[in-house]
Image (cartoon, rainbow, N blue to C red):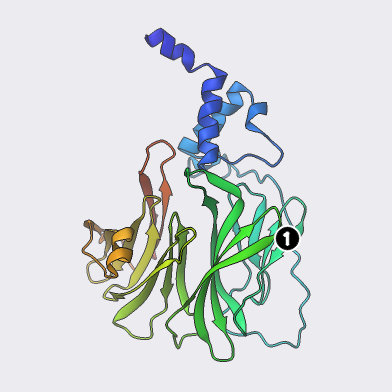
Amino acid sequence: TSRHLHGLTREREVWLSLATDLKQRGFADLEPGVALKDLSSFELVELVKRVVTGPQSWTGLDRETRPLKPYRRVTLRPPNRSTTAPVEEGLVKNQYLLLPGGQYLLGVYGDGSTLHCRHVLADQVIWTYESSLEGGKVAAFTAALCYDANGEIQTNVATIVVGVRTFPHRHNNIEILNLNLDTGVSTSLHIVSCPNTPWEIPFAQIRLKSDFALVVLDPDSDDFVPVIIIQKRPNTNHALTTIFMQKHWQQTKFDFTEAGYLVTLAYIHSQSALGLEIRDAYSIVNSQTLPPPIISECLDFSSLSGYTLFRFSIHASPILPNSSRLWVAISSNYEDIT
């Protein structure tokens, strides 16, 4: 039996099936124009290894011995803009997001007035966002590829969440839309009116993952943080929940797991620690309230000196279903840890 299993690990069809499954679930990227069926057994094995362990250049800290090798360099050419037109405060400026697969780049070039989607290889703009709201301009955005009913990624359809601020009244809104990357045609799915804030930068965070979108607004008080959770529902109105979380922590960041859990990570200044809380996002939307966390832990970082900042991200496991890994990078005045 062991000899038979060992023989299976050398079969190209085994690795092709595994690589195909990883690609359909959005874990494996290929260079444009390359198909899995054209890869050798060795190349398929290396592709799967990269998905599980990360690129070789990510290992080790010596960048001189493991330099990053860019696949392609692209020079972005922002659209022409009148130099006399005023630039509104609180808008996105020079921000970009590369969609999985590396073929499409979302970006706001220059003053933040326009959001484009560019085909990287063709060096061509295929879509330009036009707000249906009068005086609406882009203040924040994020995007992700869509999944079909079988949980397989749709490489030609992206969901885009745009934080829109209207001028001159400075009202805050969220628009969710789907963009067909083959045709360059977008469909607006939902527009949400958000609480107005007095600050120039209204949207503190925007997240999009699985069935959920999350918008965190910069609060107009020192006590509560407005958090909007939107559950995407095909062929029906999206479910919307607005919760106000107590702002008793200095820094608070949010993200989702692919299984639909809301993860809150906050820096507790008085304890020099990170507070971790995990809640069921489906329960939040269904109950329209903030239930007690399923998991609540305190991570002690009192050994770090000086002012502390952190960021984190959540990545689904390519091997274990409904499993995710949380990466946290913590920086102080004197040292960094991950």
Q: Residue at x 60, y 53 (%)?
A: 157
In this picture, residue 104 sits left or right of residue 55: right
Residue 136 drawn above or below residue 40: below
Viewer-side residue, 251 vs 152: 152
Is 203 located above or below residue 63 in the figure? below
Under mark 1, the amino acid is Ile
Residue pictured at 59% horizontal, 88% vertical: 167
Residue 6's spot in the image, x, y percent? 44, 13
Q: Residues within 10 Å of mark 1 (few under 14, many from 20)?
A: some
Q: In this image, 109 relative to 49: left or right? A: right
| Between 2 and 37, the one nearer to me in the picture | 37
Residue at the image position 42 percent from the left and 46 percent from the top = 316
Q: Quadrant of residue 24?
A: top right
Towards the viewer: 303 or 8: 8
Tell me if 301 is positioned left or right of 254 in this view.
Answer: left
SS state under label 1: strand
Which residue is at 44% across, 39% downward? Answer: 318
Which quadrant holds residue 245? bottom left
The N terminus is located in which quarter? top left
Looking at this view, is 103 or 190 the one in front? 190
Q: Position of residue 134 (x, y in %)?
A: 62, 84
The outermost residue toward the bottom is 168
- What is the x, y in percent for residue 227? 37, 72
Q: In this rendering, does residue 76 appear at all?
A: yes
Say whether residue 307 is visible.
no
Where on the picture, by quarter, is residue 221? bottom left
Give the residue pinned by disc 1: 126
